[in-house]
Image (cartoon, rainbow, N blue to C red):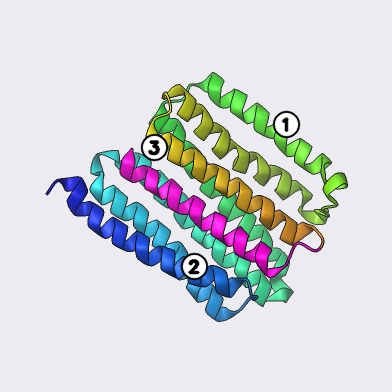
Amino acid sequence: MSQLQYFGIPYFVVLGCGCIVTLIFCIRRAKGFSVSNVMIKIASSLCFILTGVAALICNPDNYLYAGLIIFGGALGMCGDITLDLKGIHEDHKDGYMLSGFVFFLIGHVFYQAAIIYKAKLKAPVILICLACCIVFSVLNLLSAKITRYEFGKYKFIVFLYTIFLALTTALSIAAMIISGFEKPYIVLTVGALMFMLSDLILSGTYFGEGQDKPIHYFTNHFTYYAAQYLIAASILIS
């Protein structure tokens, strides 16, 4: 049995268990906040981190890229916890909200570092991607008048976070094109796009009106976990 086949077994076992736990969480989370849901969410987030670790064991020569992706996932788990705690401890809502933004933003920095390192992206490509993402973030704020989103005191952190969120996607697309559409970058790009879709839905639940129904919570978390599992999967096939 080859190394990939042997170590791929625990990877798919963890992935399978993670998908089950995640589906349970998505269904429960759609019904509201609770301490038990936070515990299940931690387990779900831990599973996508463990899939990354299992992928690293299978592909040890790719340790730097894998390490950056796993660190990014770990920061995502921290963001997961703080954002759900804001729904339980309303008196500390602002602190948990800001912490969640910061954890996810730094997590994206790790993902971006991984992409830049793995794809060996040059400075001009990175700067073009960054410029496009800044424009995208500005347009996102300006569109609030049309979408009727009320960012309020979170306007700056939303502006900053949107840049980094979009940059992960932009760099993934750049790496995919430059590499000639190699499989790891395709998977990574799909994961990054799912991340953006998840945050788009989340933005509606936080800042929009009438977008905090069970279906919105379910799709937000479903797309988010799909994104994290896809990003972790890029370690296995890179």
Question: Camera-side residue: 98 or 128?
Answer: 128
Locate residue 175, reporting x and y percent: 47, 29
Is there CB contact under 8 Å for labels 2 and 3? no
Crowding around mark 1 (Cα neighbors within 10 Å: few <14, some 14 to 19, many 20+) is few
Residue receiving disc 3: 184
Residue holding disc 2:
23
Q: Helix, strand or loop at disc 1?
A: helix
Residue 96 makes an appearance in the image: no
Q: What residue type is labelled 1?
A: Val
Residue at the location (75% across, 61% down)? Answer: 211
- CB of mark 3 within 8 Å of CB of mark 1? no
**What SS does tag 2 mark?**
helix
Marks 3 and 1 sit apart, C-alpha to C-alpha, by 27 Å
Q: Position of residue 53 (x, y in %)?
A: 32, 54
**Residue at the outermost left position:** 1
Tell me which numbered mark, 2 or 3, is placed earlier along the sequence. Answer: 2
- Whether the magenta-drawn stretch holds residue 235 is answered as yes
Q: What stretch is highlighted in magenta?
A: 210-238
Q: Which residue is drawn at 62% across and 49% down?
A: 197
Q: Which of marks 3 and 1 is nearer the N terminus?
A: 1
Is any atom of residue 50 visible in this view? yes
Horizontally, residue 103 falls left or right of residue 180, namely: right
Dot 2 and dot 1 residues touching (CB under 8 Å): no
Which SS type dominates the magenta stretch?
helix
**Image location of residue 87, percent across then percent down:** 67, 72
Query: Few, some or many C-alpha atoms within 10 Å of disc 2 (few <14, some 14-19, many ≥20)?
Result: some
Q: Residue furthest front?
A: 215
Tell me: residue 135, above or below residue 34: above
**Element under disc 3:** helix
Q: Identify which residue is drawn at 63% across, 54% down.
A: 101
Mark 2 → mark 1, Cα distance in angstroms: 35 Å
